[in-house]
Image: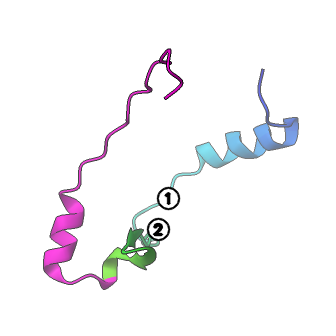
Amino acid sequence: MSHFSATEHTAISSAAAVQLTDDERQPCEVWTRVMGYHRPVASFNTGKQGEHAERRFFTETQRGSSSNGC
């Protein structure tokens, strides 16, 4: 079962069929959180952009329930 309406399914299907050339695309601005506020990565200096590119993402495993409630 899907949470999309029939109209949304039609829009998604037709959007998936659209193919753009590189000339028709526009750049995507990536923002990241730095020291409690958000900044565009493009405004970083060369070193900070390199650090951002080397970031590794992870997913924490969920802890099992313990008997002492902690």
How does the figure colour the protein chain or chains? rainbow
The residue pinned by badge 2 equals: 25
- Pick whichever of labels 2 and 1 is earlier in the sequence: 1
- Would residue 42 appear left or right of 31 to someone viewing this image? left
The residue pinned by badge 1 equals: 20
CB under 8 Å between callouts 2 and 1?
A: yes
Where is residue 21? Give x, y as percent.
44, 62
At horizontal 43% and vertical 24% (from top left) the residue drawn is: 63
Magenta residues, start to end: 43-70
**Which image quadrant for residue 43?**
bottom left
Q: Which residue lies furthest to the top in this view?
A: 67
In this rendering, the answer to whether 21 lies above or below 18 is below
Residue 24 belongs to the span the image colors magenta: no
Amino acid type at circle 2 is Arg
In this rendering, the answer to whether 44 lies above or below 67 is below
Name the main secondary structure of what is drawn in magenta.
Answer: loop
Where is residue 25? Give x, y as percent.
47, 68
